[in-house]
Image (cartoon, helix red, strand yellow):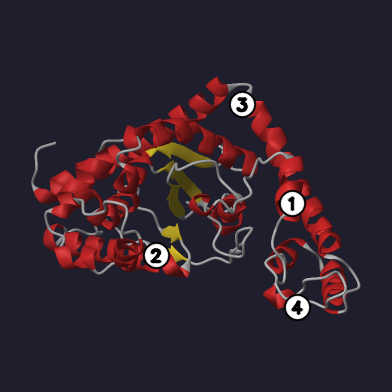
Amino acid sequence: MVTRPRVLSGMRPTGALHLGHYHGALKNWVRLQDDHDCFFFVADWHALTTHYQEREVIERNVYDMVVDWLAAGIDPNRATLFIQSRIPEHAELFTLLAMGTPLSWLERVPSYKHQITTQPNRDLATYGFLGYPLLQAADILIYRANFVPVGEDQAAHVEVTREVARRFNHLYGRGQAEPVLPEPAALFTETAKLPGLDGEKMSKSSDNTIEMREEPEVVAQKIRRMPTDPQRVRRSDAGDPARCPVWPFHQLYSNADTQAWAREGCTTAGIGCLDCKQPVIEAIQREQQPWRERAEAYLSNPKQVHWIVEMGTERARTIARQTMKDVRDAMGLAY
């Protein structure tokens, strides 16, 4: 029997997933199921690193997010779905790794420095936030994942994980035939970055999103209200797609003929902006229809969703416990 390479990834339960989540990560998860042993987890402890005062947000969103995963095509028969906080071994490994991880490794992580400087109104001066990359390392290493699917902007987190594993193996794994905690590799796969309705990054905090299970009429309203080329003031003014926030949606959702039609119509004022938006509206609604149908089946049977998560959590816990036994043995701790 050939063992498939193991992949691990997680998402924080901060609200309903939107099209940016799907095209930036979730679509890739669905593809990875075909030839990888996939572990996908709800990173509720990670949500607490920045939203520790907002307990109700996490409680409400955990299972809603799992439904979004299932609606998008994640198959619980081919992927292990679980909740981070249900497996205390994550916290145990995090604690043990913290004993030997230099503080400077965490302080130099780009995302840490970026959020400290760009979110002055949020209290991020906590040990939990500083230790976020180390908890993430524990999440990965406890399942001995071969790969972590990331965008290039997240590669630093995987590199920290590799350094942490390397240091642990140097301190405690010498003389062993295999490393106690194998170093994972970043899995860079092609993902589409979809901007928000205003042309900026799609984000709930910016109120510029289209949710994965948004009602069709709401999708149409949101797209129709999107700003377009600011220099196309009148219907008779020629526009430039490069200046229009709608154009990236065409690049993702429209075929070559439709893109050519939209470009020609915009640059010659042959079509109006509402005309240009209609193919995008229809394409998004078509994409969402199977998601909405699959989600409805799960929403009408919430016990099935809980059972899927329970089964996945039990499988993940079995692996996590074995890793912790090996870690404790290597460190000379009683198990």
Q: Which mark is residue 299?
A: 3
Instruction: Classify residue 300 by image quadrant.
Output: top right
274, above or below 64, in the image: below
* Residue 166 in the image, given as x and y percentages of width and height: 23, 65
| Disc with the residue nearer the chain's start (2 vs 1) | 2
> What is the CA distance from the residue labelled 3 to the residue labelled 2?
36 Å
Q: Amino acid at mark 1?
A: Ile
Left or right, 318 with respect to 206, comes to: left
| Disc with the residue nearer the chain's start (4 vs 2) | 2
Disc count in the image? 4
> What is the CA distance from the residue labelled 3 to the residue labelled 4?
43 Å
Q: Dot 2 lies on which element?
A: strand
Q: Which mark is residue 185?
A: 2
> What is the CA distance from the residue labelled 4 to the residue labelled 2?
41 Å
Label 2 neighbour load within 10 Å: few <14, some 14-19, many 20+: some
Q: Residue at x 8, y 47 (%)?
A: 332
Q: In terms of depth relative to the viewer, which is nearer, 274 or 308? A: 274
Res 180 seen here: no
| Disc with the residue nearer the chain's start (3 vs 1) | 1
Q: Nearer the viewer, mark 1 or mark 4?
A: 4
CB within 8 Å, label 3 to label 4: no
Q: Amino acid at mark 4?
A: Asp
Label 4 neighbour load within 10 Å: few <14, some 14-19, many 20+: some
Instruction: Classify residue 84 by image quadrant.
Output: top left
Q: Amino acid at mark 3?
A: Leu
Instruction: Name the quadrant of the C terminus.
Output: top left
